[in-house]
Image (spheres, grey):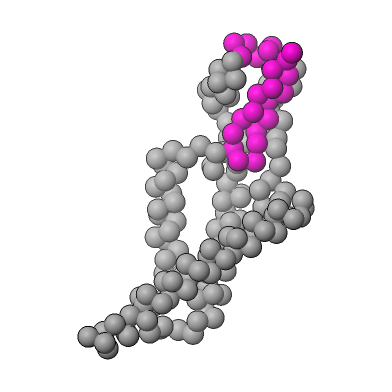
Amino acid sequence: MPTAFASMFDLAMPWWQFVLRACAVYFVLLLMIRASGKRTMGQFTPFDMLLVVLLGSAVQNALLGSDTSVAGGLLLAATLVALNWGVGFVSARSANMEAMIEGSPVLLARDGEVYRGVLRKELISRADFDKALREAGCREIDEVKLAVLETNGHITIIKRS
């Protein structure tokens, strides 16, 4: 029994390859998610959940290679958590990094005028925009002073006073 237990922790490759693979996959996925737009993370639908599960499955071999050890999985998890913490740390201390990683808010409407081209570019349907209006208590677009797509994908409506 002790040999079976010990073999669970035998790595199939050097530890630094796990770290290197985790870094590569993390940053490539970060770029892909960032390129997919703000609404991808703002509206988490069942399709988005499916995408997350499939992404995890798709990158599993890139992360683990042929390793199936507990130690390899734990090393990868620790590396990914550390990378995520590091990106958050850098983003919180540098406005340029924050803008690069999280993006910046986008103006969708001003003084009752909806910027339809911006809605299209940001992949926001008119139905989603109208829902945000209703949630803000606006019956008509004329009541809107500003409508902003936040970096987290939510739409903020500021009413005219």
Eyeballing the image, is 111 above or below 14? Answer: above
Eyeballing the image, is 106 above or below 158? Answer: below
Q: Quadrant of residue 105?
A: top right
Residue placed most toward the observer, 123 or 8: 8
Residue placed most toward the observer, 116 or 156: 156
Measuring 54% from the left and 43% from the top, which residue is drawn there?
41
Q: Which residues are magenta?
A: 138-161
Q: Quadrant of residue 71?
A: bottom left
Q: Quadrant of the N terminus?
A: bottom left
* Residue at the limit of the structure toward the front, as seen here: 2
Instruction: Specify whether residue 146 is painted magenta.
Output: yes
Task: Give the x, y percent position of residue 14.
Answer: 49, 85
* Residue at the limit of the structure toward the bottom, as seen here: 3
Measuring 39% from the left and 60% from the top, which residue is drawn there?
57
What number of labels is visible? 0
Task: Give the x, y percent position of residue 153.
Answer: 59, 37
Q: Quadrant of the C terminus?
A: top right
32 with respect to 107 (left or right): left
Task: Give the x, y percent position of residue 34.
Answer: 61, 50
Measuring 72% from the left and 30% from the top, which residue is drawn there?
107
* Residue at the limit of the structure toward the left, as seen here: 1
Residue 58 is at least partly visible in this image = yes
79 with respect to 71 (left or right): right
Task: Give the x, y percent position of residue 119.
Answer: 63, 30
Eyeballing the image, is 132 above or below 21? Answer: above
Eyeballing the image, is 77 above or below 91? Answer: below
Q: Quadrant of residue 87?
A: bottom right
Measuring 44% from the left and 56% from the top, which residue is drawn there?
55
Instruction: Specify whether residue 121 is painted magenta.
Output: no
Residue 119 is at least partly visible in this image = no
